[in-house]
Amino acid sequence: MIERRPFESLGGANHGWLDAKHHFSFAGYHDPERMHWGALRVWNDDTIAAGTGFPPHPHADMEIITYVREGAITHQDSLGSRGRTEAGDVQVMSAGSGIRHSEYNLEPGVTRIFQIWIVPDQRGGQPSWGAKPFPKGDRSAQFVALASGMDGDEDALPIRADARVSGATLKAGESVEYRFGPGRYGYLVPATGRIDVNGVALQARDGAAIRDEEVIRITASEEAELVLVDVAA
């Protein structure tokens, strides 16, 4: 089963400094049919104006993965961590028992991010933050694990969940496959480009909710950048 969720159907709000689109219920957007997808709770598509951002605020018991699509995001938190994550790179915050952080676009132009929240396997624990570059060339025509709590993904940023966030890039006409384990849920979004997923056509920033598919084959009709989440039910 692959359910296309067109970008135009997403919830969201434009706050001026922040234009936010929500694949799942979040903040003022509530849809009982889009509360979560397995352990995946949030997928926000955010455009943040230059010189603005999210002031310090708290989180707990959530794995928060930020995939930067354009520009850069600067993070600071109550652990003393600080870092700048730029386009193509990824940061992970394990909120654990509780953490406060801020995220600002200190760049001269807009910053665009996907922010993905995954429910951890266990509550509590010491919070942590980390970031890592993932060159797009390394993801050409193959999925690379960006953040993961699954066996075999030692090169990915660690998360405390039975889940994997992967990225791939495709040229027009190229294809890539991904195999799911039994009972797994997938959620796929092309950051850019147009693709076909097992016969389902997606435009840039559409979502595809995937279930009961052993293998998906993705073919790009134009150059595409893909982000895929694989989670437990």
Image (spheres, grey):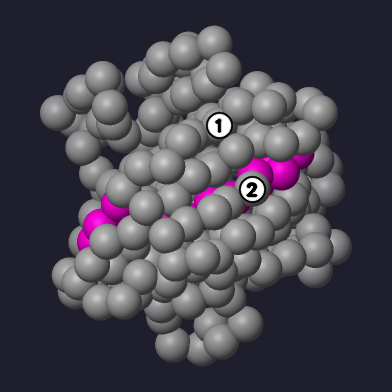
Instruction: Reply yes or no: does residue 65 show up in magenta.
Output: yes
Q: Which percent across, then down, holds residue 44?
A: 44, 36
Residue 182, image quadrant: bottom left
Q: Mark 1 touching mark 2, by CB under 8 A?
A: yes
Q: Is residue 46 magenta?
A: no
Q: Position of residue 105 (x, y in %)?
A: 66, 35
Q: Which residue is mark 2?
A: 74
Residue pictured at 71% horizontal, 43% vertical? 72
The residues colored magenta run 59-73
Residue at point 23% right, 67% down? 97
Residue 173 on image: x %, y %: 80, 46
At mark 1, the secondary structure is strand
Q: Residue at x 48, y 76 (%)?
A: 158
Q: Nearer the viewer, residue 91 or 39?
A: 91
Depth order, front residue of 196/167: 167
Please state if 121 lies on the left or on the right of 160 as rendered.
left
| Tag 1 residue | 53
Give the residue displayed 55% in from the left and 31% down from the top: 53
Give percent across and percent down for residue 156. Answer: 58, 76
